[in-house]
Amino acid sequence: MNALDTLLMALQAIARNKLRSFLTTLGIIIGVGSVVAMVHLGQSATRSVTESIASIGSNLLFVMPGTSQRGPGGLRSTAEPFEMDDVIAMRNEISGILVAPSISTSATVVIGNANESIPVTGTSNEYFTVRNHAVEFGRMFSENELIAGDAVCIIGKTLIEEMYLGQDPLGSTLRVGRTACRVIGVLEEKGQSMGQDRDKAIIMPLKSVQRRLVGKLDVQSIFVSALVDGTTQQVQQDIESLLRQRRHIDTPKNDDFYVRDTQDIAEALARTTNTLTILLGAIAAVSLLVGGIGIMNIMLVSVTERTREIGIRLAIGARTHDVLTQFLVESIVLSTIGGLIGLVLGVGGTWLVTQQLDMPFVLSPGIMLLGFSFSVAIGIIFGFFPARKAALLNPIDALRHE
Amino acid sequence: MRKDATAIPAPDNALLQMHDIYKIYGEGSTEVKALNGVSLNINAGEFVAVMGPSGSGKSTCMNILGCLDVPSYGEYLFRGVDVGKLSLDELALLRRHFMGFVFQSFNLLPRVSALNNVELPLIYAGIKRSQRQKMALQALEIVGLGKRASATPNQLSGGQQQRVAIARALVTQPSLLLADEPTGNLDSSMAHEIMHELKKIRDESGITIIMVTHEAEIARYAERVLYFVDGKLLKDGTPDEVLT
């Protein structure tokens, strides 16, 4: 009996009972499909996080009051906020950096009949470079506007789409809280980033937000960008010692502020998504295992049901290993077909989801190969026991089986 | 006259020889002697009917003759080979090359065409596909079903199904055809047709046929009748001798 005949015989047996074959293999389809989809989606998520962090700005440091380990009660609120003087000190004493102070709030924005709550950031012109979010149309703030805290703003694309209904906003006036504000520029489009629409934003001079919206002269956080690649760490140390000096802190342990690197954040998030990927993959692998048990189950039923057929085959000269091979090949073919369908569905599903969620579509041949070979392995492992049972049947009993 | 089979010396052209065969099931008090010291010779080309009440050991004897089973004691020589000393796989090879089986319930594979059913033994014999199909078609033509090659068993009548089964048994050109109540599931006219067919095949090819049957009428197609009672070969002779 050659390999081709064995394969044809298996295909024939599978085709003889199409519905059952499909149900048998469904477990494998779902198993492989979910493993492939989960791991791919996890990788897409990791990539998406990395990319969106890169889009925030590279070589970027966040400087915030509070401690990085937030204990019960949140120490952050008790720490003294920064002032504009801190920013000026940084600019003067540390070279090779861009510093953008910022204060964020949320305000009701009214344009004509439309009104919506929009995040508002008060900052300086450095912000556009440091946060890698340039002004596409119009202009940045003038020196006078920054010093005087004029009611001018630069708006994100989402506002144009949703509130201006696509009309040119430059030169128009909108209301931010109780302040009438002139639009002088439009930010370039950034899209979604970690669940947030970065185009749904209004940027105003720092002083404008401080005075007109918040009513305090605090600087909430400071964004710092190192101008030379690879100096981020040095800059971080410089900022830390400068702030310690200014805030009269003796040891790093007592810091009431923290400096975070985007790289750190990216790595932390990537670790989280990786853990999630492994977790989801493991859960999906369990379903693959269940699929394998399903194959074994149906193959056992099939062996019982086809006992007479096995008896006939043994009577007309099939040897033990001919029968073993036949049933083993059947289950391998079933699981392989299931694996292939699962692979296609898994990749297809991943593509659909990434399209919907606007994530990058990452294809990993390694994962695809792994999922596929897993399904073949399951066919062998879970097919062996039923096949052995079939092969060890006594021909006389098998022929008598009703 | 073969009243006492054990007394007959084995002729040289004997296809198979049984010497004092026992087949015992169970142990101790539950011990059952399905065959209790059976000896017989069957020559190549003989057409033998095996008869007896149920439980007489005729089926056990058939299974041993067909190498589906091995005796507990005694020697069974098939073409001079001691079958009792063979492994399961060697028995399978003996069946593959030298034996054909026909069953009462036809035992064709369901939802598989007549041609593919007949082809099956040739697949195990490792014959190439194109030649296989030619041989299977020839076998079907011999039993008069050349035109129904693509029909599946449920599209065929009982008589036709049994013809397909006969074609399957003959396609490997075996030296021994074992038929276990081949007409048991057929009506009387169909049964006689099948018996004519078997007889014709034997006359043309010289194959040896051993057939179990309940019906004296069917047994009369054979030239020799073995009558079993309680695991022993009680009578062995021509139908006229045994059946009267």
Image (cartoon, coloured by chain):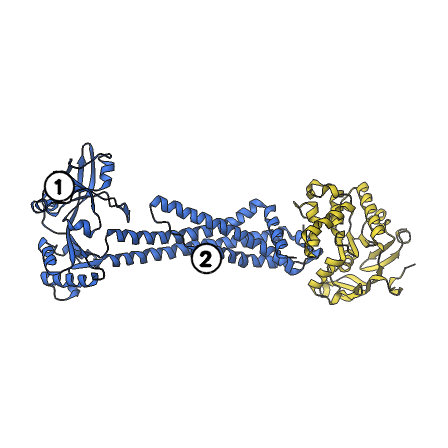
Chain to which the residue tagged by mark 1 belongs: A
Q: Chain A: give its colour.
A: blue
Q: Mark 2 points at which residue?
A: A370
Residue A319 percent across, percent down from the top left: 67, 60
User: How many labels were placed on the picture?
Assistant: 2
Q: Mark 1 points at which residue?
A: A152
The residue most toward the right is B1
Q: Which residue is drawn at the image coordinates 17% and 50% (left, top)?
A: A127
Q: Can residue A52 be seen in this view?
A: yes
Chain to which the residue tagged by mark 2 belongs: A
Give the numbered dot on residue B207. none
Label whose residue precedes the other's in the sequence (2 or 1): 1
Answer with the quarter of the image where residue A110 lies: top left
Q: Is residue B56 visible?
A: no
Alpha-carbon distance for marks 2 and 1?
Answer: 57 Å
Amino acid beneath label 2: Leu
Task: Locate the N terminus of chain A and report the quarter of the image it occupies.
Answer: bottom right
Q: Is mark 2 on a helix, strand or loop?
A: helix
